Amino acid sequence: MNFVIDASVLIKFYVPEILSDRAERLLARVEKREIALLAPDLIYPETGNILWKKQRLKELTHSEVEEISDAILWLPLKIERSKALLTVAVDIAIAYRITVYDALYLSLAKVYETTMITADRRLVEALAKANFKDSITWLGSYA
């Protein structure tokens, strides 16, 4: 089974935050090879930006950022190029008034006929009544 994850979930694998316990359960299933994780290549700069911000706010040290960055690069993620998803993502973003960034993850979930997991509850709520309600789930609902 595959799931698409976004940067809001990926960061919780390594940084203790609200819902990190749910993310750790997901990661444990990856490590046991029960599931596979997918993401567009956008996930790396997005996650890097989160780490940069946390370091600027003194929530993480420079060495912690380096350690987490290395761990992220070693995580077995199946990465898809954003270029191939862009046209569909722009259409989704316009139709549902979400960012193209978020729409890239959602597009990937649609391509693989799977579910996107996000810690962004507002995004899930924004799409709850749309054609994507079965393609996206909130990390807090992940068992």
Image (tube, rainbow, N blue to C red):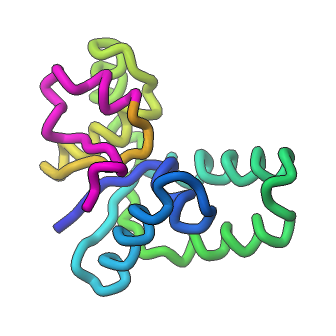
Residue at image location 52% in from the left, 66% down from the top: 13
Q: In the figure, residue 95 lies in which quadrant?
A: top left
Residue 113 on the magenta span: no
| Quadrant (top left/top right/bottom left/bottom right) for the N terminus | bottom left
Q: Where is residue 104 shown, x and y percent of the image? A: 37, 37
Q: In the figure, residue 78 lies in which quadrant?
A: bottom left
Q: Nearer the viewer, residue 17 or 73?
A: 17
User: Magenta stretch?
Assistant: 122-143
Q: Where is residue 109 shown, x and y percent of the image? A: 24, 46
Asked if 117 appears above or below 102 in the picture, the reply is below
Q: Where is residue 53 shown, x and y percent of the image? A: 76, 45
Residue at image location 24% in from the left, 73% down from the top: 35
Q: In the figure, residue 23 lies in which quadrant?
A: bottom left
Asked if 7 appears above or below 99 in the picture, the reply is below
In the displayed orientation, state which residue is furthest to the bottom.
32
Q: Where is residue 47 shown, x and y percent of the image? A: 60, 52
Counting labels gives: 0
Asked if 103 appears above or below 6 in the picture, the reply is above
Asked if 84 appears above or below 141 in the picture, the reply is above
Residue at image location 51% in from the left, 46% down from the top: 42
100 to the left or right of 60:
left
| Quadrant (top left/top right/bottom left/bottom right) for the C terminus | bottom left
Residue 130 on the magenta span: yes
